[in-house]
Image (cartoon, helix red, strand yellow):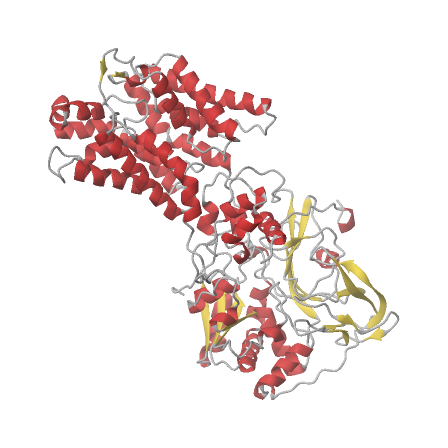
Amino acid sequence: MSKSATFERGIHPDDSKELTAHKPVETAPLPARVIIPMSQHAGAPAKAEVAIGDTVKKYQLIGSPQGFVSAPVHASISGKVTAIAEFPHPSGRLIPSIVIESDGLDEALPLKDNADYLNLGADQIKALVKDAGIVGLGGAAFPTNVKLSPPKEKPIDTIIINGAECEPYLTADHRLMVEKPQEIVNGLKLLMKAVGVNKGYIGIEKNKPDAIEIMRKIVSGEPNIEVTALTVKYPQGAEKMLIKAIKGREIPSRGLPMDVGCVVQNVGTALAVYEAVRYGKPLVERVVTVTGNGVREPKNILARIGTRISELIELSGGLVEGAVKVIAGGPMMGFAQWSLDVPVVKGTSGLLVLTEKEYVSSDEYFACIRCGSCVDVCPIGLNPSMLSILSEKGHYEEAKDYNLFDCFECGSCAFVCPAKRPMVQFMRLAKSQVKP
Amino acid sequence: MSTDAKTHPLVVSVSPHVRGGESIAKIMWTVNFALLPAFIMSVYYFGPRAVYVTALCILTAVFSEHIFQKALDRKVTSTDGSAFLTGLLLGMNLPPAVPFYIPIVGSFVAIVITKTLFGGLGYNIFNPALIGRAFLLITWPKLMTKWAMPTAHFIEMDAKTTATPLGILKEEGLAKLIEHFGDKASLYKSLLFGSTAGSLGETSAIALLIGAAILLYKKYITWHTPLSFLGTVALIAWIFGGKGALFTGDPVIHLLSGGLILGAFFMATDYVTCPTVRKGQIIFGIGCGAITMLIRLKGGFPEGVMFAILLMNCFAPLIDRGVKPKQFGAVKKEAKK
């Protein structure tokens, strides 16, 4: 593993993955109750297809997609619908959700094994992916079916499976690659077929040597699939950085992967695609890394969508004294939670609990001393120092001249800032005040 | 010990939720530390006067920042090492024999007028220590150009005064300067170790370079500003520095003398007053070098580093607007309607 691909700039936070990297995925017990939001994806929320009092089975469709960029939602347990109302969501907002009380039976709609699944046509694969409600499981939760259907003028030649998992602490993708490598590769093959390309890559950061080794073994007989070892650097797993590292192509400013002939899908998404196409299994569960020094027993848990995060924290031994912050996602881009009653959603890659010791206050910050550290690390080549000053002064229009909207809020600038400035906050503020 | 999640108040804040270990205070105190070798050399050559002058500068800087921040109802940051650094740098830029009011007035001008009244660290346009020195030079030109002979071994300095190497070079020429030190090798050696007349902390090139190496290693400064500054000085000195013919100048004398090493590594690199973008820092450094040599060769002063940096400070915001970092996925701008 001498060769390693990467992008320019970026940062090197402690990866803190040793807490859970070698812990096999445990399956959470059946929850007594799930809260399933109608919006767990980018795009239009789904419309509830059940009423209070209905009994539902696992895998049953309970929310139908509204429009092209949307996704269906399925029941993750069997039981009775007891409420349809707005509930807290990991995004921090209140989102219309369906509450199902378990009947304890976990009765599921039957799944069929289609042994000939690798010979399905592109349209059949896309339809199965769409019906299963699959969205990007890396966190952004963009409907997978939409990514697989680029417009004709954007020819695609490459599918990349994102196994970088560059967020510190998270190990859900790592464990999947070690425990279900064949399934992930089969998912990749299906994705390649769906888009009609014959080149696939699996990009993995070098801090997961076991995953790289096992994946290389699995694809050794596959001339069209390559495993690329990536430099351990944040944000290596961002689509722009990943494509640059593996294909050397730069997505143009304000563009998408399809502008450079690429489709990127997360490791967990590839697995979900495999299960959906082969068995017709809807997306009703996912692996969540529950970690940080704020929980007694960090672990990787396979949890039903809709399980309250407090239950996963209890499964991980509960909070320790001095736990102060619970984050859905990773420490760099995750969302701090105000309630532990929020459910696991399709995009919940991890739950990170930080203690007082690790907690960094962003209440007190100083004027920008223009040291240039942020300029040196910004993966997009922005001048975050200038952008933060413009935003702070309310010169939002001018910020656009400094490519404000190319910022994808990775937080590298805030990580290195010696004046402890809330850089991501400044970017979001400016973005909210002007039209792109 | 409760494990009931509901009883725990949770902190909600914007991402990222982890941060690197850098802070303004850590950077500033490291720069102060990096100046320690040069300070020790100044005490070695100029005796207790060096401690007296530098201490007055530092004390005035820290106290006046503290008092004015309190009075203006601002956040008090006088212990973050930045006022200390301004005082230390001003001290190193003063002649050894100045009377007590010189460090006090200079430090006050540097901290209060140049920094605090502009809004404090981050908002000042000019390098505070250099404005302090410029004010003193213009107000008390005689006192500010009275150079004491360095002695050695931490004893009280010689009362005899002399010209600085750049002063001799300007007034009497290279041959006279070499004669003054015996031969060329002894001249270089004196410049390297600092046994020449000059400001307290600027004379020992080696001590300053040790400090610069610390800052480069810690990545608190990068090569861009100092190297382009020094390179431009060397190039112009070589081309135009000779008597008569082009390409006969001695770049080494120009590199090692005056406040160039101190200025290039510790003052031109001041974050707040130099450009943020590395490419812009190269332009900044070249500008500093060119103005320094213009003053040294054609101006009325033997030394030009201070005015060069101050003049380029004016251009730093402009450079930052014009020079952008290499943008990922840059696309040609569509023609405006």
Relative vertical location of residue B336 with respect to residue B266 in this rendering, above or below: below
Q: Is residue B330 left or right of residue B290?
A: right
Spot occupied by residue B244 in the image (x, y as percentages of width and height): 11, 34
- Nearest the viewer among B243 and B235 is B243
Q: Is residue B226 visible?
A: no
- Residue at image position (68%, 81%) is A280
| In the depicted structure, whether residue A95 falls above or below residue A51 | above
Horizontally, is B294 left or right of A340 in the view? Answer: left
Question: In the rendering, at what x and y percent does residue A389 appear?
Answer: 53, 43
Q: Residue furthest front?
A: B337
Quadrant where the N terminus of chain B is found in the figure = top right
- Measured as percent of width and height from the top left, residue B31 is found at 41, 33
Q: Quadrant of residue A309?
A: bottom right
Whether residue A415 is visible here, answered yes or no, is yes
Of all residues, the one furthest to the right in this rendering is A53
Would you place residue A195 above or below residue B314 in this image? below
The x, y position of residue B169, in whole percent, is 18, 26
* Of A105 and A188, the residue lying toward us: A188
A353 relative position to B325: left or right: right
Q: Give residue B73's quadrant in the image.
A: top right
Q: Considering only vertical position in the picture, is B116 above or below B16?
A: above
Q: How many marks?
A: 0
Q: Which of the pair A106/B33 is nearer the observer?
A: B33
Q: Which residue occupies 28% across, 20% down?
A: B45
